[in-house]
Amino acid sequence: MDRIGLDTRISRKESFLLANDGLYLGRLSLNTSTLDSISNNENIYGSHFSSISFKNRYSIYGSPGSSLSPYNPNTLTPPVIYLKGEKIGCLSKNVNLTNRVDPDVLNDWMISQRLFD
């Protein structure tokens, strides 16, 4: 994501995932109708088949062997979580990272954060 796009999302206080290489990975929202929501299985961010979805276990953003994937238990470069415009941690299986959310409980975490829009 370019700096202008990132700054815009931050100024709008959006909640989203950002890959460590700068690629936008989708809005953190439980709304399955939102176009860029990771909960919308019909879009590139929520699909299990998209090359830029962390839900696709064969993509560089979802493969357990990729350093950019939250499913790699050893990665030091997982996706970054922005909550309401603030960088608050990461999405990762790596138990050694601080302020992490396990990708397998992300929906529960989004419920706790009231990310319904």
Image (spheres, helix red, strand yellow):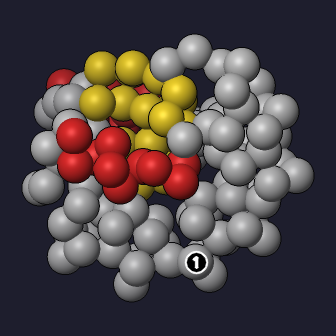
Q: Residue at x 72, y 19 (%)?
A: 96
- Residue occupying image coordinates x 53% and y 27%: 100
Judge by depth and name the residue closer to the eye, 117 or 71: 71
How many numbered callouts? Answer: 1
Answer with the quarter of the image where residue 53 lies: bottom right
Residue for point 22% across, 49% down: 111
Element type where label 1 sits in the image: loop
Q: Identify the residue under disc 1.
A: 48
Q: Position of residue 103 (x, y in %)?
A: 54, 49
The image position of residue 117, as x and y in percent, is: 11, 55
| Residue situated in front as seen by the camera: 93 or 58 | 93
Residue lying at 20% horizontally and 37% vertically, measured from the top left: 113
64 displayed left or right of 24: right
Q: Is residue 41 visible?
A: yes
Q: Left or right: where does residue 71 sit relative to residue 101?
A: right
CA neighbours of label 1 inside 10 A, class few (<14), some (14 to 19), many (20+): some
Q: Residue 8 or 44: which is nearer the viewer?
A: 44
Instruction: Tell me which corner region of the image, top left, top right, bottom left or bottom right, holds residue 16.
Output: top left
Q: State the residue lying farthest toward the right.
A: 65
Query: Is residue 44 depicted above or below 70 in this figure?
Result: below
25 with respect to 12 (left or right): right
- State the image coordinates of residue 109 (x, y, percent, origin top left): 33, 42
The kind of residue tagged 1 is His
Residue 46 position by quadrant = bottom left
Residue 68 placement (x, y as % from top left):
73, 43
| 65 up-or-down from 14: above or below | below
Is residue 36 visible in the rendered structure shown here? Answer: no
